[in-house]
């Protein structure tokens, strides 16, 4: 373990940071877009610091929006999220929690937790403000039409990103447009529910007692299947998670067959970040586009 090589930025309107005097900076594995480290604060509390590598700096307001999303998950969705110790322009400081226990009991409880989140229905798809997914804006313009929302703001939204245009050819993009036109045939109607928005295995951790905790949200109102498609498609948890979720949430028949289509949003987002540096993702994205387009 080593000291952090750079002093953290301080929150707006404050002269000090909770990271002043923090020691024991230790890198943690996690998402692809941010640098995450575990530290011990000067008062002895263990904490996790999420920062964007320099360059680039995190876009203005990114971490404030993430903190607001955590509050929405907790206050509206009734799920556990880490306590926020500090929000600054280029970092977020959270209470450190425990590693995820890889037991059937934990996964069953996590399935019920996500089902409880998805039981909260909204009147429209989207959110009251745009957010972030990784280092790119997440478009959350509100609409009452789930197919229109998913097509426009979760799929076509990435078609104009430079790295997507480098990774996919004109045939691929035409297939994407065709898929968006066909969405009402391919995805059954469903209500807008409160979703985590970036629900994959690494965003599930636990308290010391093994109670599930959700981190790193990109909160918005969407189809429940859109959330489930990501966790089913990327580093899939064991079956007790899905069995407990289905028992509590009653997903529509055939949901497993639709996960590759709905997870196209995540594939396009990944390409928008990494482009031709992600050949496996390009291959898999093209396969989905051929299958449905």
Image: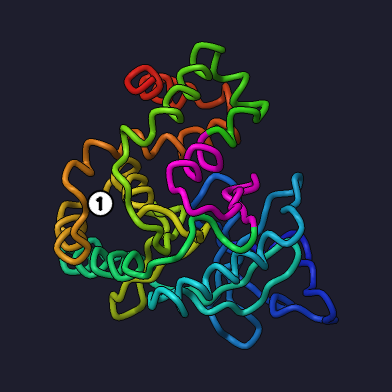
Is residue 148 inside the magenta stretch? yes
Identify the residue shown where x is 70% and y is 80%.
18
Report whether residue 29 is seen: no
Q: In the picture shown, does residue 13 fall above or below 276?
A: below
Q: How is the image coloured?
A: rainbow
Is residue 126 inside the magenta stretch? no
Quarter holding residue 209: bottom left
Quarter holding residue 102: bottom left
In the image as oriented, which residue stretches furthest toward the bottom? 43
Query: Looking at the picture, how far across and down is residue 157, in whole percent?
Result: 59, 36
Report whether residue 22 is seen: yes
Q: Nearer the viewer, residue 16 or 76?
A: 76
Identify the residue shown where x is 46% and y is 71%.
73
Query: Looking at the picture, how far across and down is residue 137, in whole percent?
Result: 65, 47
Q: In the picture shown, does residue 42 fall above or below 257?
A: below
Q: Nearer the viewer, residue 35 or 279?
A: 279
Left or right: where 4 falls relative to 213: right
- Residue at which label 1 appears: 237
Query: Looking at the picture, how far across and down is residue 172, in whole percent?
Result: 49, 16
- The part of the chain drawn in magenta is 130-155
Left or right: where 90 falls relative to 102: right
Q: Nearer the viewer, residue 276 or 184?
A: 184
Identify the residue shown where x is 46% and y is 53%.
198
Query: Looking at the picture, how far across and down is residue 236, in whole percent?
Result: 27, 46
């Amino acid at each position: 373990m080593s000291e952090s090589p750079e002093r953290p930025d301080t929150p707006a309107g404050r002269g000090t940071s909770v990271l002043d005097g923090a020691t024991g900076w230790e890198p943690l594995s996690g998402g692809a877009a941010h640098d995450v480290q575990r530290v011990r604060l000067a008062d002895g509390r263990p904490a996790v610091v999420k920062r964007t590598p320099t360059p680039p700096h995190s876009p203005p307001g990114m971490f404030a929006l993430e903190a607001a999303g955590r509050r929405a998950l907790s206050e509206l969705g009734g799920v556990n999220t880490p306590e926020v110790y500090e929000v600054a322009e280029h970092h977020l400081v959270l209470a450190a929690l425990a590693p995820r226990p890889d037991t059937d009991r934990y996964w069953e409880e996590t399935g019920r937790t996500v089902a409880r989140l998805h039981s909260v229905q909204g009147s429209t798809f989207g959110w009251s403000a745009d957010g972030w997914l990784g280092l790119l804006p997440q478009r959350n313009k509100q609409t009452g039409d789930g197919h229109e929302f998913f097509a426009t703001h979760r799929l076509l939204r990435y078609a104009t990103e430079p790295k997507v245009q480098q990774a996919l050819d004109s045939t691929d993009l035409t297939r994407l447009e065709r898929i968006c036109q066909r969405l009402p045939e391919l995805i059954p109607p469903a209500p807008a529910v409160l979703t985590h928005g970036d629900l994959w295995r690494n965003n599930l951790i636990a308290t010391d007692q093994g109670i599930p905790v959700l981190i790193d949200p990109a909160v918005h109102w969407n189809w429940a299947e859109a959330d489930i498609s990501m966790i089913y498609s990327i580093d899939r948890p064991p079956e007790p998670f899905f069995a407990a979720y289905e028992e509590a949430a009653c997903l529509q028949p055939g949901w497993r067959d639709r996960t590759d289509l709905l997870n196209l949003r995540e594939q396009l987002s990944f390409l928008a970040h990494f482009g031709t540096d992600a050949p496996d993702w390009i291959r898999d994205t093209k396969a989905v586009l051929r299958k449905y387009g």
